Image (spheres, rainbow, N blue to C red):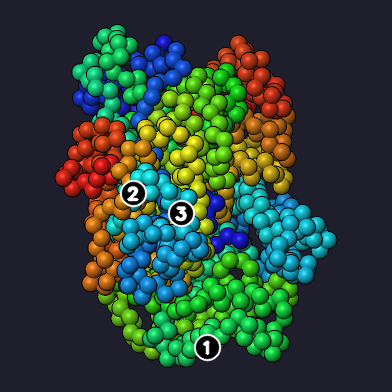
C-alpha cells in the first residue's frame, strides 16, 4: 500500500474523517493503483478572467441608447451584416463582441448561454479583494480560510461517510462493489492549470496545480526513482503546508503516468490559441478524455484591466477576446461528444464603469457578464434581469448593477451538473435559493 | 508591442489571501522548534552561546539572500545587533568588488537615454529600413546587428541578471533585501509601454536611495517617476475637457482636424512639412482617437490608497479615490518615443518625445507637471479640503498627508512583518512597529531596526517557517554554493518556470510575500528540478565549484545549511545514493546533465524541503 496521505491524516485524523464526512481517500487510492481509468466523470471548467473584463463590450447591449452616449470612442457598433466590426446580434437587444464570433454558432445551437448583470454584491473595487471574495465564495468576509471549490469537493466527497479508518476493508469494498464511484478519490479530482494554486481550490481537500502536463514531475517526468526520493523527504517534512502540497502532487504524477492523458491529441482541425491559456484548455481536455476523475478544473487568463485605450470593435480588448473565444471554441470542438459531460463557465472579479474614462479605457466597476457553455447548458439565451444603463439605473450612478449573485450562478451549475449538495456549506452565510436560479441548465 | 492589458503573467491568482497556512498547527510548531533547537545545540558554536547562534542565524536567514558559513561566523563575531547596525548603513560598507561583476549586465547600469540609444524601439529600426509595413524577425535581427544595437527585451535579461548578482555578491545584503521589498511594494511592470526603458532608473532613483530613508520621500519619488506614471496610467489623466475652457478650445481644434477626411489631413500635414513616414502613423492615431474626450483616470489614485499607503481597509471611499485622482491631474511626463503602445501624439504632427530614439534628448521621459491639465477646483480628501486654484501642491499635499497617516503606518508594517516575520504576523508586532513608524514619521531605518530586533521577530515560533520566494531560492542556491555564473538563459528560464521573473509582476501588488502563495505542488516540483539542474551542470553558464560537491555529504550539507540540523537529510541522501545511484542518475543522464554521486547529492540537498525555508 502506498504511504498514507499525510495531509489528510494530519488535518482530519480519524475523528475528523467522520465528522466532516470525508473519505479516507488513501484507502480508495489503493484501488486506483491498478486502474488505467477512473471512469467517465462530469466536469465543470472555471475560467477566471483576472483583471476585470469589460462585460459591457464583451456582450453589448446595443439597444441601450445610454451605451452609445457614455462610450463615445469605445462602443461596439450596432449589428450590421457581416462586416466583422460590429456587434453580432444575439436576441435583438444584446450582441456578442465581433472578436467572439467563434462562439456565435454555439449560441445559435443552444450550447452557449450568457448571464448578464451578474457578479458579487460586495461594493469593493479592489481587484485583490474582489478576486478573493469570488474565490472564497464569501463576499465581505476576509477571514474565510479555504476556497469555495475546495469546500465543494469536501462536502461532496464520497457518500460512505460513517466508515472509520478501522472499517478500511469494508470501506474499500463499498468502492469495489461499485456502490461508490472511484472518482471522488482521484488525486486529480480538482486541478488548477498553472504554477500556483488559486485561492478557489485551496483548502483541506487535496487539489493539484499543474503548470504543464508535459513536464509535470521530476526531471521532466522521466524519473520515478528521483520522485520517490523527494517524496520521502517531503512527506517527512514538518511544514505541513509543503508536505501536503508535495504529497498531493506525487499522487497526481502517479495517476498521470498510468492514464497517460498526453496520448489524446487535439482532434484534426482543432487549433488552440498559442500561449498559456490555449495550452491549459488543451490539457484540461486531455485530462477529461483520459478519464482521470477530473471534476473541477480551473484556469485563468489575464489582460483585462483596460484603463487605457481599450478600443472598441478592434484594439486591445478585442485581441484578448479573440484569444478567449478561439480558446473556448477549440476546447468545445476538441471534446466532441464529451462536451455533454462538461460545463465551462467564465468569471471575472467585477465589471467596469459604464462610461469610458478620460483615456479611452474604463475604470473599476461592478456588474459583469458570464459565459456558460457545454452540453448541459440551456443556451441560446441571454439570461438574467437587465437593470439598464441610464444614470438612475446604474450602481452608485456609474456601474452596471447586479441582478444575479455569482453564488446563485455557480450553485446552479454545480448542483445541476455535478449533483452537488450541502450548498449552504459551500457558500456559508448565503441562502442558496433554487427559485432564484436563472435557468442556466434549463 | 505590449500594452496596458498585456500580461505575460496573469493578474495573478488571488494574490491577497487571507487563508494563511492551513499549515502549522501549534503542536507541529512546538515540535519543529524543539527539533531546531536540538539541532542548534548540536551545531558548533565557536563564538557564542546557543542564544546568539540561534538569533544570528535567524537574522541572517531573513535579512540576507543566503547564509554561508563565513556569514554566520561574521555575525557571531560582531554579534547580531552590531551586524544589523552595520547593514543599516550600507554606504559605509565597501562594495567595490561588485562593480566589475555588474559590468557583465550593461543595460542595468544605463541611463534612460542611453538605453533608448542602445536598445531602441523596433520602430526606430524600421525607420532605418525605410519604414516598410512589415519587417521579418530576421531582417530586424540583421539590422540590429549592423547598427550595433539590441532588442529592448534584452534590457530585462540584464536587469534580472544584475539583480541576481547583487543578491548573491553584494556585501550590502540588507540593502538588497529591502530594495526588493520596496520595489515590490511600489511595483511597476517591465512590459507596460515604455517602462522597459524606465524601470532600471526607477529602482535606482526612486527606490534604492530611500530604503533606509523617509517613507514620504520614497512615496513622492515613486509618484513622480515616469515608470509609475506610465504603469498606473496617471501620465495622461487630466481635467475633463468639459470642465476646462482652455482644453475645450484645444479639443475643438482637434475635432476640426479629426473631422477632415484622411486625404485633407494628409495635405495639411504635407504643407506643414511633416515627414511622410509620420503621416501614416498620425492617421492611425486619428482613427484610434476619434470622438474620445480626455479626462480623469482613477488607476493610480486607487492603488496609491489601497496598496502604497492606507491599505484596503484604511478608511477611504470611492469618493476619495476620485478626489485623489483629481489632485493628480497634470502629473505627467515628457513623452518618450512612440511605437511603445501607449505614448501618443498630443496634437497634429507634434510629438515631443520623438527625439528619444534618435537624438537621445535628455528631457524626454522625465516628470512634467502640466498646469493646463490640472483640475483647479477644490477637492476634499479624507475629510480634508484642498483649496481651489492650485497646481502640483494638490498632489504633494495628498502624498504628505498619506505618508504619515496611521492607516499607512499599520499597512506598511503589516507588509514588512508578513515578508520578514510570519505570514500571519502577531497583532502585537504590528502595534509595536506602527508606533515606531508614527513616532519617527516614517523613518525606514528606525522601522527596519525595530522589525529585526523586536522580541516577536526572535520568538521561536517565527524561526525557520518562511518559504523562500523563487527569487530568494535561486539567489541563495547560487550564493551558498559559491557558484560562478554569468549571463544565463538557463537561469532566466528557471525563474520563469518558478513564476517569478524579476520586474515582470503585472499586478500592482507585486509578488506575494506569503509562503502559502508559493507552496503549490507544481511550484515545489519545479524547486526540486531547479536543485538537480543547478547541481549537475544543467543550467547554462552556471558552474558550482568542485570543492563543494567533492566533500562528504555531511560537510557539504553544513556548508549549505550552516548551523542547522541536517542529520535526517544526510541519512536519506546517503542511503538513496548508495542503494540506487544508477537508477537515480539515469533520467538526469537523458537530460545530458553530468551527475556523479556527489553532484546528485548536492542536487537532492538543494531540492530538499530544508533548503526551501528561511
- Could you tell me residue A347's position as x and y percent? 36, 49
The secondary structure type at the circle numbered 2 is: loop
Which sits in the foreground, B526 or B600?
B526
The secondary structure type at the circle numbered 3 is: helix
Could you tell me which residue is drawn at 62 percent across and 18 percent down?
B584
Q: CA distance from mark 1 to mark 3?
A: 35 Å
Circle 1 residue: B256
Which sits in the foreground, B520 or B174?
B520
* Circle nearer the N terminus (3, 2): 3
Q: Quadrant of the C terminus of chain A?
A: top left
Could you tell me which residue is drawn at 24 percent across and 63 percent down?
A387
Image depth: mark 1 or mark 3 in front: 3
Circle 3 residue: A100
Q: Residues within 10 Å of mark 2 (few under 14, many from 20)?
A: many
Which sits in the foreground, A95 or B485?
A95
Q: Residues within 10 Å of mark 3 (few under 14, many from 20)?
A: many
- Could you tell me residue B14's position as x and y percent? 39, 47
Circle 2 residue: A380
Q: CA distance from mark 3 to mark 2?
A: 15 Å
Quarter of the figure with residue B293: bottom left
- Whether A253 is drawn above or below B519: the answer is above
Check the residue under mark 2 and report the chain it is in: A
- Could you tell me residue B396's position as x and y percent? 43, 77
Could you tell me which residue is drawn at 41 percent across and 16 percent down?
A32
How many circles with numbers are drawn on the protein? 3
Amino acid at each position: 500500500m502506498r504511504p498514507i496521505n499525510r495531509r489528510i491524516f494530519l488535518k482530519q485524523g480519524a475523528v475528523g474523517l467522520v465528522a466532516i464526512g470525508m473519505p479516507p481517500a488513501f484507502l480508495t487510492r489503493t484501488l486506483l493503483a491498478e486502474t488505467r481509468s477512473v471512469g467517465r466523470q462530469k466536469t465543470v471548467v472555471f475560467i477566471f478572467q483576472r483583471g476585470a473584463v469589460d462585460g459591457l463590450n464583451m456582450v453589448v447591449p446595443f439597444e441601450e441608447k445610454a451605451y452609445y452616449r457614455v462610450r463615445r470612442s469605445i462602443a461596439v457598433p450596432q449589428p450590421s451584416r457581416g462586416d466583422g466590426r460590429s456587434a453580432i446580434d444575439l436576441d435583438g437587444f444584446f450582441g456578442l463582441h465581433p472578436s467572439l464570433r467563434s462562439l456565435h454558432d454555439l449560441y445559435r445551437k443552444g450550447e452557449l448561454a450568457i448571464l448578464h448583470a451578474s457578479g458579487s454584491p460586495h461594493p469593493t473595487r479592489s481587484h485583490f479583494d474582489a478576486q478573493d471574495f469570488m474565490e472564497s465564495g464569501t463576499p465581505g468576509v476576509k477571514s474565510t480560510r479555504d476556497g469555495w471549490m475546495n469546500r465543494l469537493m469536501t462536502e461532496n466527497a464520497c457518500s460512505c461517510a460513517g466508515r472509520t479508518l478501522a472499517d478500511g476493508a469494508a470501506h474499500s469494498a463499498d468502492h469495489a462493489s461499485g456502490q461508490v464511484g472511484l472518482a471522488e478519490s482521484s488525486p486529480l479530482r480538482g486541478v488548477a492549470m498553472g504554477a500556483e494554486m488559486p485561492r478557489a481550490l485551496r483548502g483541506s481537500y487535496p487539489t493539484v496545480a499543474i503548470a504543464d502536463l508535459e513536464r509535470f514531475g521530476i526531471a521532466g517526468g522521466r524519473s520515478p526513482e528521483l520522485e520517490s526520493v523527494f517524496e520521502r523527504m517531503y512527506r517527512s517534512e514538518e511544514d505541513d503546508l509543503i508536505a501536503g502540497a508535495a504529497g498531493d502532487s506525487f499522487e497526481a504524477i502517479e495517476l498521470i503516468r498510468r492514464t497517460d492523458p498526453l496520448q489524446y491529441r487535439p482532434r484534426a482541425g482543432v487549433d488552440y490559441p498559442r500561449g498559456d491559456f490555449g495550452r491549459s484548455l488543451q490539457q484540461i481536455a486531455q485530462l477529461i478524455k483520459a478519464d482521470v476523475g477530473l471534476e473541477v478544473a480551473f484556469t485563468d487568463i489575464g489582460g483585462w484591466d483596460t484603463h487605457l485605450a481599450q478600443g472598441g470593435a478592434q484594439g486591445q480588448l478585442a485581441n484578448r477576446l479573440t484569444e478567449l473565444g478561439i480558446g473556448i471554441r477549440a476546447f468545445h470542438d476538441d471534446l466532441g461528444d464529451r462536451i455533454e459531460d462538461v460545463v465551462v463557465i467564465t468569471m471575472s472579479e467585477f465589471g467596469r464603469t459604464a462610461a469610458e474614462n478620460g483615456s479611452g479605457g474604463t475604470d473599476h466597476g461592478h456588474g459583469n457578464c458570464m459565459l456558460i457553455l457545454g452540453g448541459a447548458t440551456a443556451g441560446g439565451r441571454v439570461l438574467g434581469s437587465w437593470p439598464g444603463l441610464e444614470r438612475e439605473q446604474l450602481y452608485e450612478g456609474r456601474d452596471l448593477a447586479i441582478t444575479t449573485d455569482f453564488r446563485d450562478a455557480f450553485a446552479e451549475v454545480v448542483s445541476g451538473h455535478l449533483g452537488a449538495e450541502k450548498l449552504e456549506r459551500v457558500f456559508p452565510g448565503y441562502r442558496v435559493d433554487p427559485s432564484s436560479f436563472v435557468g442556466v441548465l434549463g | 508591442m505590449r500594452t496596458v492589458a498585456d500580461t505575460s503573467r496573469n493578474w495573478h491568482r488571488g494574490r491577497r489571501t487571507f487563508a494563511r497556512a492551513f499549515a502549522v498547527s501549534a503542536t507541529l510548531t512546538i515540535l519543529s522548534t524543539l527539533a531546531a533547537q536540538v539541532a542548534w545545540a548540536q551545531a558548533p558554536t565557536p563564538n557564542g552561546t546557543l542564544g546568539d547562534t540561534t538569533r544570528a542565524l535567524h537574522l541572517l536567514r531573513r535579512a540576507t539572500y543566503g547564509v554561508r558559513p563565513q556569514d554566520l561566523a561574521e555575525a557571531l563575531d560582531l554579534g547580531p545587533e552590531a551586524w544589523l547596525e552595520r547593514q543599516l548603513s550600507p554606504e559605509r560598507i565597501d562594495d567595490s568588488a561588485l562593480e566589475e561583476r555588474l559590468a557583465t549586465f550593461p543595460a542595468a547600469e544605463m541611463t534612460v537615454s542611453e538605453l533608448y540609444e542602445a536598445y531602441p524601439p523596433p520602430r526606430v529600426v524600421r525607420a532605418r529600413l525605410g519604414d516598410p509595413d512589415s519587417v521579418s524577425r530576421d531582417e530586424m535581427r540583421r539590422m540590429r546587428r549592423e547598427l550595433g544595437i539590441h532588442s529592448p527585451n534584452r534590457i530585462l535579461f540584464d536587469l534580472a541578471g544584475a539583480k541576481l548578482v547583487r543578491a548573491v555578491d553584494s556585501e550590502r545584503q540588507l540593502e538588497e533585501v529591502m530594495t526588493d521589498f520596496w520595489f515590490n511594494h511600489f511595483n511597476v511592470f517591465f512590459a507596460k509601454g515604455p517602462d522597459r526603458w524606465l524601470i532600471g532608473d526607477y529602482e535606482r532613483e526612486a527606490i534604492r536611495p530611500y530604503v533606509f530613508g523617509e517613507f514620504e520621500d520614497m512615496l513622492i519619488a515613486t509618484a513622480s517617476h515616469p515608470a509609475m506614471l506610465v504603469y498606473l496610467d496617471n501620465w495622461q489623466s487630466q481635467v475633463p475637457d468639459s470642465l476646462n475652457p482652455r482644453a475645450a478650445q484645444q479639443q475643438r481644434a482637434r475635432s476640426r482636424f479629426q473631422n477632415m477626411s484622411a486625404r485633407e489631413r494628409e495635405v495639411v500635414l504635407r504643407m506643414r512639412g511633416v515627414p511622410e513616414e509620420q503621416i501614416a502613423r498620425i492617421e492611425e492615431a486619428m482613427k484610434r482617437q476619434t470622438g474620445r474626450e480626455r479626462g480623469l483616470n482613477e488607476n493610480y489614485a486607487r492603488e496609491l490608497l489601497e496598496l502604497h499607503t492606507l491599505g484596503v481597509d484604511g478608511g477611504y471611499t470611492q469618493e476619495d479615490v476620485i478626489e485623489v485622482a483629481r489632485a493628480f491631474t497634470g502629473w505627467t511626463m515628457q513623452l518618450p518615443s512612440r511605437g511603445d503602445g501607449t505614448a501618443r501624439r498630443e496634437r497634429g504632427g507634434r510629438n515631443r518625445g520623438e527625439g528619444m530614439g534618435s537624438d537621445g534628448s535628455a528631457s524626454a521621459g522625465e516628470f512634467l507637471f502640466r498646469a493646463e491639465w490640472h483640475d483647479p477646483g477644490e477637492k476634499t480628501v479624507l475629510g480634508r479640503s484642498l483649496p481651489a486654484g492650485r497646481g502640483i501642491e494638490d498632489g504633494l499635499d495628498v502624498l504628505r498627508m498619506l505618508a504619515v497617516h496611521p492607516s499607512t503606518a499599520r499597512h506598511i508594517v503589516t507588509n514588512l512583518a508578513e515578508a520578514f516575520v510570519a505570514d500571519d504576523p502577531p497583532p502585537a508586532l504590528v502595534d509595536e512597529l506602527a508606533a515606531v513608524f508614527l513616532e519617527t514619521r516614517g523613518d525606514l531605518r528606525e522601522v527596519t531596526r525595530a522589525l529585526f530586533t523586536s522580541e516577536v521577530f526572535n520568538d521561536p515560533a517565527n524561526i525557520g517557517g518562511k518559504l523562500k520566494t523563487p527569487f530568494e531560492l535561486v539567489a541563495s542556491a547560487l550564493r551558498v554554493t559559491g557558484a560562478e555564473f554569468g549571463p544565463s538563459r538557463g537561469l532566466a528560464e528557471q525563474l520563469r518556470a518558478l513564476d517569478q521573473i524579476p520586474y515582470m509582476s503585472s499586478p500592482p501588488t507585486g509578488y506575494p510575500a506569503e509562503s502559502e502563495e508559493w507552496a503549490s505542488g507544481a511550484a515545489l516540483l519545479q524547486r526540486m528540478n531547479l536543485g538537480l539542474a543547478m547541481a549537475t551542470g544543467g543550467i547554462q553558464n552556471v558552474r558550482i565549484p568542485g570543492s563543494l560537491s567533492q566533500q562528504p555529504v555531511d560537510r557539504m550539507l553544513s556548508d549549505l545549511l550552516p548551523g542547522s540540523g541536517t542529520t535526517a537529510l544526510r541519512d536519506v541522501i546517503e542511503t538513496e545514493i548508495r542503494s540506487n545511484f544508477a537508477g537515480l542518475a539515469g533520467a538526469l543522464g537523458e537530460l545530458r546533465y553530468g551527475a556523479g554521486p556527489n553532484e546528485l547529492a548536492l542536487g537532492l540537498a538543494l531540492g530538499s524541503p530544508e533548503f526551501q525555508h528561511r
